[in-house]
DNA sequence: TGATGTCTATCTATCAGTAGGTAGGCAACA
DNA sequence: TGTTGCCTACCTACTGATAGATAGACATCA
């Protein structure tokens, strides 16, 4: 089945938002990307908050699908898999996690978008916490929060510094610190 | 000595950028904030990259001045002082760390701004690393990177979630994890 | 079968508002 | 007199959003 126009717009929007931010992403740019006019983008997403909400919802769903593929039996393999998801989401000079961008812009963003962003972070923490509890490591909650925050923050520091190794350093340190938290 | 107009503009700009982002901050808004016209703002900061660079430079200098006030002899007191700086920088629904915002927008920002943002992160890591080394804790570098990333990321997650306690949870977990990293 | 109505997805054209930036003038002050 | 700091007035480009039209698909009904 070929992509629907709605899906094409979301793909283009994700790319732009993850590299330039939500506010900097315009309906005209997206229209150009997919080969229609900006008025037609408004047909699919009446307002910008509508677009933002759909974008984060879709991102979280895809992320969840990837999480569900990770086996939980081997603690270290699972943690490696988790970090790989973040690592793949971070391409130097191209993109960082959609929700890191949305989170940083949060204060000026519509409430419906922030709610979806919050849900993304909760999804991640819940998955991690379940994994840690299953293996009797840490107290669960705190370690999970720390890891998610460190990975998101690590992406931002590494992106601003134009140095991918900074993200990898943070990711490794986060894993190594587990158990003592 | 009363504030110079340049200083007033920087204060207004910092407030706006930290709550709404750099791209969303306009010369007109700033002019309005300080009671002059936008053309006059251009007199002090010819272009937007000029403004951004001055903004981050000033922020880093002020942060460094605060860091220098923290005594290094007591490890835990020093860590508490460090985290307080971040904690004070984070006011729910009002502002997060300037460099968290700049870092998240980094890909679409002028290079001179990114360089200053990078310098801010390096400043923080160097201070932390020196503290940890002095007390023979951790291997220094990795733990310092993890803490900075976690604090920046913690602010973003907490801001998007509209829940300040998330930041505090991350901050505590980051400190507790020290030594094992 | 053919006419009628409705829905989808797009178009053109336009709106008011705002963006960053510039030219040139004016007044205070060293 | 020259510099500083601000002004008015303007420019071009772009923003999100809307109105109104249209072509084609499909379904209902005489």
Image (tube, coloured by chain):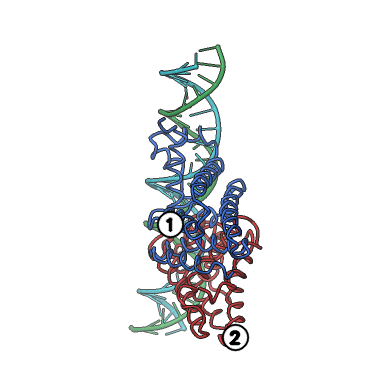
Chain colours: A red, B blue, C cyan, D green
SS at circle 1: helix
Residue situated in front as seen by the camera: A118 or A62: A118
Number of the label disc, if any, that sits on residue A151: none
- The residue wearing badge 1 is B87
State the quadrant of the C terminus of chain B: bottom right
SS at circle 2: loop
Residue situated in front as seen by the camera: A147 or A109: A147
Task: Give the x, y percent position of residue D2.
Answer: 56, 17
Left or right: residue A177 versus residue B37 is: right
Residue situated in front as seen by the camera: B10 or D17: B10
The residue positioned 50% from the left and 65% from the top of the image is B175
The residue positioned 50% from the left and 84% from the top of the image is A136
Residue situated in front as seen by the camera: B178 or A6: B178
Task: Give the x, y percent position of residue A173.
Answer: 60, 69
Above or below residue A44? Residue A123 is below
Left or right: residue B65 versus residue B31 is: right
- The residue wearing badge 2 is A74
């Amino acid at each position: 089945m070929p992509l629907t126009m709605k899906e094409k717009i979301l793909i283009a929007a994700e790319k732009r938002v993850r590299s330039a931010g939500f506010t900097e992403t315009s309906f005209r740019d997206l229209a150009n990307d997919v080969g229609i006019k900006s008025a037609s983008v408004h047909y699919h997403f009446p307002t910008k908050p509508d677009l933002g909400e759909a974008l984060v919802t879709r991102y979280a769903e895809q992320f969840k699908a990837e999480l569900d593929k990770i086996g939980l039996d081997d603690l270290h393999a699972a943690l490696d898999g988790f970090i790989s998801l973040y690592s793949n989401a971070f391409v130097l000079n191209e993109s960082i996690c959609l929700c890191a961008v949305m989170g940083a812009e949060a204060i000026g963003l519509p409430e419906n978008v922030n709610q979806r962003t919050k849900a993304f972070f909760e999804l991640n923490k819940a998955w991690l916490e379940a994994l840690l509890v299953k293996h009797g490591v840490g107290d669960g909650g705190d370690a999970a929060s720390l890891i998610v925050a460190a990975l998101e923050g690590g992406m931002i520091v590494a992106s601003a510094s134009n140095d991918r190794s900074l993200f990898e350093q943070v990711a490794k340190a986060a894993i190594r610190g587990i158990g003592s938290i």
